[in-house]
Image (spheres, rainbow, N blue to C red):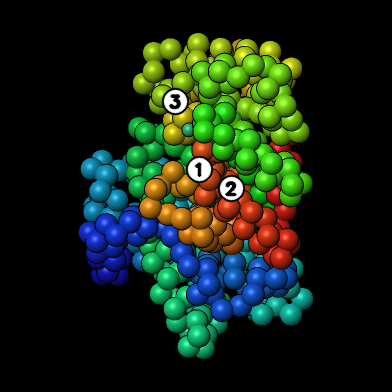
Amino acid sequence: MRYILILLLIFTSAAHAAGPEKIATYDRKTWPEAIDSNAAFDRASAFEGYHFLDVLSAVDTGSAETIRAFTGVKEPDMASVKRWVRFARGELVKNFNAAQRQDAKGWGGGSKIDSAETYLALMRPHYLTLPPEYDQWKERSRKFHTRYVYEQLRLAALFPRITSEILKLDQSERNGFELNDKQFILTFDDGPSPNGVTGKMISELNSRNLKAAFFLLGERLETLPPEKAQALYAGHYVGSHGYTHKAHPRYAQWQSSIDRTHALISAVFSTPSNRIGFRPPYGQRTPEMIAHLRTVHHSLVALWNIDSQDWNRKIGPDQLSDRVTTLILLWRKGIILFHDMYPKSIEAVGALHDFSREANIEFVDPG
Ligand SMILES: [Zn+2]
């Protein structure tokens, strides 16, 4: 039973609780190739995808008993698990084909594939014949994807009882999978930060000519004079994170939280209501909220698909950018979630921008 091995891996690392192991982190230096061209990006991407699919296919995701044991969720929602597994496998197949398309030499065989099984079968000989200098990467990457698949399956097992970014509740929602291959959007939640990190983050972004999206809390925006807020966010996209940082499905005042924040942002930044995306705290929302946004504000729920987990005190800037880089290689497109209250996130964004120039990926203007 391969999934028992995976469980052991997870629980051994969790039991040590040494810190970073509790979330999926990485050491990108273990990948011995420079990722400095389209072809190098595609190769690294296909190998990360291989590990992800290999780990995922070792879990019997059709069995509630397995999912219960694997995720620790007592009553896993098997329809959501099935939906996410199908979606994730489909994305990886698309990514494999995108990698093949851009590489004239076709190191992966050059063929277009239509299933995750073919992906694994085509990549396996390449994987197995990697020279010994890839051994450390193999170990680190497998650990990462084991933990990451656990994180994702757990969110899927809880959905929609506890909603999150893992799946869409409505087709109108945006989570980053709508973008083109190698396109990404940087987003920052919970600001404006009381510790001045927002200003430093925006200076860093501006010095690198990057445009990002900031999802603000109404109650924090109110602490700034409007002229100051306008100057702070000039050139960047501003959306709503609600008035206060509460899980809105269990918050009786959710409607006024959304309405007040839309009104505030409209007043301060002269943004039309339909241009103000709502990013629900913790990604938790209900069909009523989606309907309310649509009918009253003509606006949408704005989620993400790459969670940096920068809130975790135990990860430093290098591990942060390594985790995000790995998820960039895995998904090849997406909306990246950061918070503008941690100085380490500024460093990580700098490292990611340097990476993007080498690897020829694009941070697009969300505005
Ligand atoms: Zn938040």
Is label 1 in contact with label 2 (beta carbons under 8 Å)?
yes
Give the crowd class for mark 1: few <14, some 14-19, many >=20 residues within 10 Å.
some
Asked if ligand 1 lies within 8 A of label 1, the reply is: no
In the image, what residue type sits under mark 1? Tyr
Instruction: Give the CA distance from mark 2 to mark 3.
Output: 22 Å
Residue 236 or 317: which is nearer the viewer? Answer: 317
- On the picture, is 181 further left or further right than 349? right
| Mark earlier in primary sequence (2, 3) | 3
Q: Amino acid at mark 2?
A: Ile
Q: CA distance from mark 3 to mark 1?
A: 17 Å
Q: Quadrant of residue 144?
A: bottom left
Q: What residue did someone put label 3 on?
A: 245
SS category of the residue bearing label 3:
loop
Q: Nearer the viewer, mark 3 or mark 1?
A: 1
Which residue appears farthest toward the front when viewing the image?
Answer: 195
Residue named by callout 2: 346
Q: Residue drawn at (29%, 66%), measured in percent from left and top?
A: 9
Q: Secondary structure at mark 1?
A: loop
